[in-house]
Amino acid sequence: MNLHTRLLALSALVAAPLVAAPTALAAVPQSSPAAVPAATCSVSGILDNGKVHLSGGGFNQGTAHVFGSDGFGGTVEIGQNGGFQIMNVPPAQYSVRQGGEVTQCSGFSG
């Protein structure tokens, strides 16, 4: 085999993995970005005054709307840390809506 033929054969062997590498990388599934923690909300046990505390976390900073099964509701400001607290509300099943997402609050069994 002459030198020119050997160089062509060697070039093909060296180039093959370089050509195949982008295809192989495209076939590897890309990992999804870290999932945003799901918002949570909970109702405390009934306090001595007959009321409960409502608290939550994992929300986006801004305004959210609180709805209670007894008709109590309103808006709450979500802090930078994604959390909120509402003190001394009537015991009820609560949900919090922020944007198009509704989070059911746990902890009420009345």
Image (cartoon, rainbow, N blue to C red):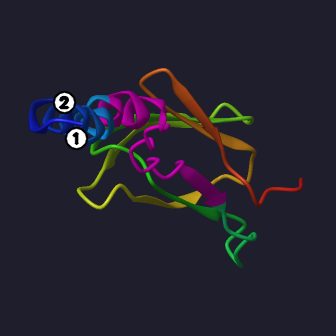
* Residue type at numbered disc 1: Leu
Q: Which residue is drawn at the image coordinates 67% and 60% (left, top)?
A: 43
Name the spot of residue 26 as percent of width and height, x first: 39, 29
Quarter of the N terminus within the rendering:
top left
Left or right of 50, for residue 14:
left
Q: Residues within 10 Å of mark 2 (few under 14, many from 20)?
A: few
- Seen as rendered, the residue at the extreme right is 110
Left or right of 55, for residue 47:
right
Which stretch is magenta? 20-42
Which of the two residues, 86 or 24, is positioned nearer the viewer here?
Answer: 24
- Seen as rendered, the residue at the extreme bottom is 48
Name the spot of residue 4 as percent of width and height, x first: 10, 31
Tell whether position 37 is magenta.
Answer: yes
Picture quarter containing residue 9?
top left
According to the picture, the residue beneath numbered tag 1 turns out to be: 10
According to the picture, the residue beneath numbered tag 2 turns out to be: 5
* Residue type at numbered disc 2: Thr
Left or right of 2, for residue 59:
right
Q: Is residue 78 above or below residue 70?
A: below
Left or right of 86, for residue 5:
left
Q: Which residue is drawn at the image coordinates 20% and 38% (left, top)?
A: 6
